[in-house]
Image (cartoon, grey):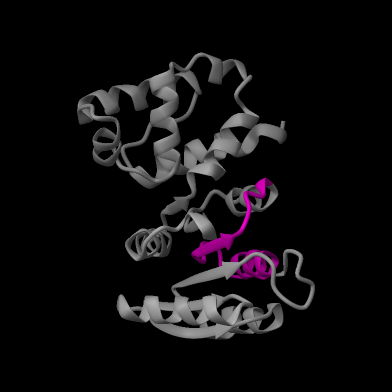
């Protein structure tokens, strides 16, 4: 699996290269600025991009804008964003096309290699890897909506874990309940939020994220 990395800090960039290589990934390019990232994404066609939001020369949202432009040229290009902060605009832009293959992780909340590698692989396979704090902020924007108010406390817990990309089995383990109970909760969630039901884990995650992302769009 070929990866393009964009990170302006040398030590972090080098650490990402070494960690990914140790888990069998091929590093197609490791760059430290926006123009080089754009060229790498256009010319190398990686399987996944791991991108810092703020890159030279602007140090604003250069990394994300390069990644979004690459996804417009190559729909579905998997992109995992690494950021210092929860910035809802960036998360919403990533989720806007609803195609999956997106992730948003906070640098100081990645606690071990396995967690990070799992996120990279999920995104590369077309899934999602969203930090719980990102999901919490998206949830908070819709907390007063009438459909959200219909959810029980347990259903909100299940919805949050679902939005993170967890399977029914993983949710059941996390909440110490049966998979059957989780299936019932997810069915209730989809009914109350008027979302199309799906047995496909990725599609149901995208449906939930699209709902949360719609907080300001109406």
Residue 144 x %, y %: 63, 19
Q: 26 or 175, which is in the foreground?
A: 175
Magenta range is: 63-88
Q: Position of residue 170 (x, y in %)?
A: 27, 41
Quadrant location of the N terminus in the rendered image: bottom left
User: Residue at left 54%, top 80%?
Assistant: 11
Q: Residue at x 75, y 70 (%)?
A: 59
For the point 58% across and 82% down, which residue is it? Answer: 10
Instruction: List x then y, in percent, for residue 58.
Output: 79, 72
- Quarter holding the C terminus is top right
Q: Is residue 122 left or right of residue 14?
A: left
Q: Is residue 167 above or below residue 44?
A: above
9 w.r.t. 162: above or below? below
Q: Is residue 103 visible?
A: no
Q: Is residue 80 magenta?
A: yes
Q: Nearer the viewer, residue 86 or 155?
A: 86
Residue 37 is inside the magenta segment: no
Quarter residue 148 falls in? top right
Q: Is residue 177 left or right of residue 49?
A: left
- Locate residue 169, reporting x and y percent: 24, 39
Q: Is 51 rendered above or below residue 173?
A: below
Q: Residue at x 60, y 60 (%)?
A: 83
- Left or right: where does residue 202 sit relative to residue 28? left
């Amino acid at each position: 699996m070929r990866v393009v990395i964009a990170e302006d800090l040398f030590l972090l960039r080098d650490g990402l290269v070494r960690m990914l290589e140790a888990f069998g990934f091929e590093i197609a390019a490791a760059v430290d600025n926006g123009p080089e990232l754009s060229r790498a994404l256009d010319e190398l066609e990686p399987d996944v991009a791991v991108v810092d939001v703020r890159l030279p020369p602007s140090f604003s949202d250069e990394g994300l804008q390069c990644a979004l432009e690459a996804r417009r040229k190559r729909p579905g290009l998997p992109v995992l964003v690494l950021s210092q902060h929860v910035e809802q605009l960036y998360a919403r832009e990533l989720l806007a096309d609803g195609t999956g293959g997106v992730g948003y992780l906070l640098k100081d909340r990645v606690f071990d290699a396995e967690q990070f590698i799992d996120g990279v692989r999920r995104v590369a396979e077309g899934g999602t890897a969203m930090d719980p704090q990102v999901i919490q902020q998206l949830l908070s924007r819709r907390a007063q909506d009438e459909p959200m108010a219909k959810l029980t406390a347990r259903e909100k817990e299940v919805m949050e874990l679902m939005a993170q990309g967890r399977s029914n089995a993983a949710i059941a383990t996390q909440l110490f309940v049966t998979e059957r109970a989780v299936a019932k909760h997810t069915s209730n969630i989809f009914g109350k939020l008027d979302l199309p039901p799906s047995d496909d884990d990725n599609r149901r995650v995208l449906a939930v994220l699209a709902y949360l992302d719609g907080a300001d769009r109406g």
